[in-house]
Amino acid sequence: MSFLPEILPIAREAGALLMSYFGKVVIEYKGEVDLVTEADRKAEALIVERIRSKWPTHEITGEEGTRTDSGGAYRWYIDPLDGTTNFAHGYPVFCVSIALEHKGERIAGVVYDPTRDELFAAEKGSGAELNGRKIHVSNTATLAESLIATGFPSHKRHKNPNIHFYHRITLHSHGIRRAGSAAMDLAYVACGRYDGYWEFNLNPWDTAAGVLLVEEAGGKVTGVYNTPFDIASREVVASNTILHPALLAELQSVIEGRDREELPDPRVLARPRSS
Ligand code: IPD
Ligand code: CA
Ligand code: CA
């Protein structure tokens, strides 16, 4: 049974709702630094209403508070607005992320970027698509030729050690992008715009759809120690498969403190140019 024909219009509808708020939102705070807007809540309410009316027995986990647990075999993971910080600042990189799990296995995933009208979709065993056309991960063969993505958690950003990994990998690749939407980072690995991506401190609604997109597009997703990706683990390493060993090795070398390249003294930049 295919769920995509019914999920895709829901993602588009939620994306249109986000666009109707874009540029006009009032920022609120969920914690010290975690932003939320009315658009996050309205988009979640819309998606939840559509899912409940079609599949009333399905369980739902939504970032903005929807939680049901009555032992059903199906569970939806909803991030109604992934990239809230971008959205709140008028920076056009955000998306809707919706995934469906059956007995713990991801079976469908959709990431919709309403700013570019890009709809990424995957169903278990059927491949991945972007606006109806098949997508595949890149065939970049070396880290030195790769473009990699990462992200930093909005919560307690100042205590997150990811900058060490960023520093190392930026020196060994074409560069790192920190665009601010985990679901889109994964979708971009799936379609070959990025060759790899890693992040720590994520939630199931950030990764559920994007992980299936990467896997169905021929990529690989694991934890930092090459264990199978676990939705409860909060960490994710995704790649075009070819680069997976190299990306994991770079992350390991940082964890173990090997080959550390010291950060240059920032005062070097403040020195006047000699000519
Ligand atoms: C955030 C984004 C960001 C990632 C953060 C997430 P939100 O989700 O995915 O890229 O770095 O860890 O919390 O809060 O915008 O839905
Ligand atoms: Ca998110
Ligand atoms: Ca969100």
Image: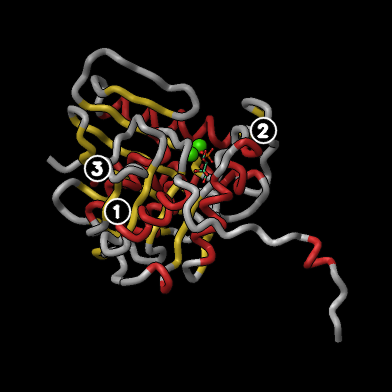
Question: Is residue 134 rendered to the left or right of residue 190?
Answer: left
Alpha carbon distance from label 1 to label 2: 30 Å
Asked if one can make out residue 15 in the rendered structure from this viewpoint, the answer is no
Residue at coordinates 66% horizontally, 38% vertically from top-left?
158
Q: Secondary structure at mark 2?
A: loop
Question: For residue 74, which quarter of the picture?
Answer: top left
Which corner quadrant holds the C terminus?
bottom right
Q: Secondary structure at mark 1?
A: helix
- Of residues 241 and 118, which is closer to you in this image? 241
Residue 108: assigned label: 3
Read off the residue under disc 1. 214
> What type is the residue that disc 1 sits on?
Val
Precedes in sequence: disc 3 or disc 2: 2
Alpha carbon distance from label 3 to label 2: 32 Å
Which corner quadrant holds the N terminus?
top left
Residue count near mark 1 (Cα–Cα under 10 Å), binned few <14, some 14–19, many ≥20: many
Residue reaching furthest to the bottom: 275
Precedes in sequence: disc 1 or disc 3: 3
Residue at coordinates 46% horizontally, 40% vertically from top-left?
200
Read off the residue under disc 2. 33
Residue count near mark 3 (Cα–Cα under 10 Å), binned few <14, some 14–19, many ≥20: many
Asked if one can make out residue 202 in the rendered structure from this viewpoint, the answer is yes
Question: Is residue 36 rendered to the left or right of residue 123?
Answer: right
> What type is the residue that disc 2 sits on?
Val
Residue at coordinates 85% horizontally, 70% vertically from top-left?
271
**Which percent across, then down, holds residue 234?**
41, 34
**Comparing labels 3 and 2, the label whose residue is closer to the camera:** 2
Question: Is residue 209 rendered to the left or right of residue 14?
Answer: left
Alpha carbon distance from label 1 to label 3: 12 Å
**Which percent across, then down, holds residue 238?**
34, 52
